[in-house]
């Protein structure tokens, strides 16, 4: 069985064709500048060089058509006909409270995705465009929507409700949803399987990339997760502030004569380690480099980032009344041994011990705690595309 996985943005479309017999990627690529002059498809048959195809893509439909053409091409394609693709899995950002799980797309599902445009204004419209393009170009294929928010749907009211007037939840659905859900679902399950843990193991996943979030789950069911109504809540990220006193918004508005929207833009795009470091970079490698050169603000930004992650881990251990394993994933989590080590140093009093040799790796699925460590610590590379493909197979297979 071959599954096509699509992640559509407003002017882009990322894809992978995955052979589910061994879960290997057989081709992947990216359409850029959809709806803009200069549309470009970059396609790669795995094991071969990337090729570039310049062709107009006024809408996502032309992009999907070009992707299928590339997949079926005699020279750089990997399939003979569209029949070889069993189904298409779509990354969809927001499912509101309706979707606690992935689902096969029908008219009701599309209506629900549309109803969540307010909650995911940048992503949901594009995600729906991708689905509708597939319905047009590959009319006989089943489309599966895999929501980034469904992992968070198992949170209890005490975890997902904000302490604001309840009517705002009732009227507008203002609650904590959590994001990176597909990654947290994948990594928490992989942790249990790879670590040979019991089925109802208590797992904390630290997804530390340019965006960052922490989740805790029991047996793969989310108990709590650090992002909220939007991805702004929680950790200090590349450009996002994470948790702050909401009164800061009004204070900056008054002092700088800015609108709420302008300040929120600053909190989303100019804060985090970028803002704390005095504007050095949103890239953690650049901040680490500046720290090495003796830059104090870079040092403080990294310290604050790790301190915040450790505080969330502490809170989640309490929320679950214990923890069996903690996994690190995404750009920083998978690659940065120092961040992993220093975050875990906050957990020493719980008997956590990192094995420095085992920790000296990048992006490798492995146990990095010592055999005496009271809590198992893992690196588990995330793979959202594979998670989407597995969900699609589960629903159509
Ligand atoms: P992601 O959003 O998951 O792609 O992660 C991107 C972030 O991971 C960027 O800020 C990178 O600087 C960071 N990253 C990647 N490799 C390393 C590394 N070896 N050390 C520190 N940060 C890294």
Image: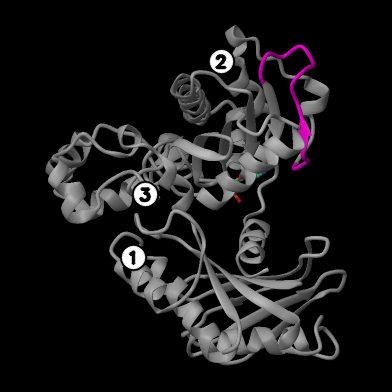
C-alpha distance separating marks 2 and 3: 28 Å
Q: Residues within 10 Å of mark 1 (few under 14, many from 20)?
A: few
Q: Is mark 3 within 8 Å of ligand 1?
A: no
Q: Is residue 271 above or below residue 114?
A: above
Q: Quadrant of residue 161?
A: top left
The residue segment tinted magenta is 363-375
Q: Is residue 99 above or below residue 355?
A: below
Q: Is residue 287 left or right of residue 114?
A: right
Q: Position of residue 325 (x, y in %)?
A: 64, 26
Q: Quadrant of residue 358?
A: top right
Q: Is residue 161 above or below residue 202?
A: below
Q: Which mark is residue 149?
A: none
Q: Quadrant of residue 72?
A: bottom right
Helix, strand or loop status at disc 2? loop
Q: Position of residue 229 (x, y in %)?
A: 32, 48
Q: Determine the residue positioned at 80% across, 83% down.
A: 79
- Reading the image, the residue beneath label 3 is 268
Q: Quadrant of ligand 1?
A: top right
Tell me if residue 356 is in the magenta stretch.
Answer: no
Q: Determine the residue positioned at 58% across, 22% down.
A: 323
Q: In the image, which is nearer the foreground, mark 1 or mark 3?
A: 1
Question: Where the N terminus falls, by quadrant?
Answer: bottom right
Mark 2 or mark 1, earlier in chain: 1
Q: Is residue 56 left or right of residue 109?
A: right
- Reading the image, the residue beneath label 2 is 346
Q: Residues within 10 Å of mark 3 (few under 14, many from 20)?
A: some
């Amino acid at each position: 069985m071959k599954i096509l996985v699509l992640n559509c943005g407003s002017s882009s479309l990322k894809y992978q064709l995955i052979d589910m017999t061994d879960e290997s990627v057989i081709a992947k690529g990216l359409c850029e500048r959809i709806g803009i002059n200069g549309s470009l498809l970059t396609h790669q048959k795995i094991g071969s060089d990337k090729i570039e195809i310049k062709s107009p893509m006024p809408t996502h439909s032309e992009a999907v058509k070009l992707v299928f053409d590339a997949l079926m091409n005699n020279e750089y394609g990997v399939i003979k006909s569209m029949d070889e693709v069993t189904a298409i899995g779509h990354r969809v950002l927001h499912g509101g409270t309706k979707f606690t799980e992935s689902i096969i797309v029908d008219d009701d599902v599309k209506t629900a995705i549309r109803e969540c445009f307010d909650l995911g204004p940048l992503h949901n419209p594009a995600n729906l465009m991708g689905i509708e393009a597939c319905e047009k170009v590959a009319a006989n294929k089943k489309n599966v929507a895999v929501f980034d928010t469904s992992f968070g749907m198992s949170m209890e009211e005490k975890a997902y409700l904000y302490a604001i007037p309840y009517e705002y939840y009732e009227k507008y659905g203002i609650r904590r949803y959590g994001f990176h859900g597909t990654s947290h679902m994948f990594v928490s399950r992989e942790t249990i399987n790879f670590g040979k843990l019991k089925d109802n193991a208590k797992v904390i996943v630290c997804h530390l990339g340019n965006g960052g979030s922490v989740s805790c789950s029991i047996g793969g069911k989310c108990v709590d997760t650090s992002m909220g109504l939007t991805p702004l809540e929680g950790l200090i990220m590349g450009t996002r502030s994470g948790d702050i006193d909401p009164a800061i918004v009004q204070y900056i508005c008054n002092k700088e004569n800015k609108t709420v929207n302008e300040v929120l833009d600053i909190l989303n795009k100019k804060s985090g380690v970028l803002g704390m470091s005095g504007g050095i970079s949103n890239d953690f490698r650049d901040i680490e480099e500046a720290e090495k050169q003796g830059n104090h603000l870079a040092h403080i930004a990294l310290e604050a980032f790790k301190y915040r992650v450790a505080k969330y881990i502490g809170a989640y251990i309490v929320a679950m009344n214990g923890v069996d394993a903690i996994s690190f994933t995404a750009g920083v989590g998978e690659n940065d041994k120092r961040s992993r080590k220093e975050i875990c140093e906050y957990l020493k009093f719980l008997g956590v011990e990192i094995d420095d040799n085992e920790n000296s790796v990048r992006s490798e699925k492995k146990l990095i705690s010592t055999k005496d460590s009271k809590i198992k610590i893992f690196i588990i590379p995330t793979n959202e595309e594979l998670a989407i493909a597995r969900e699609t197979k589960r629903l159509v297979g």
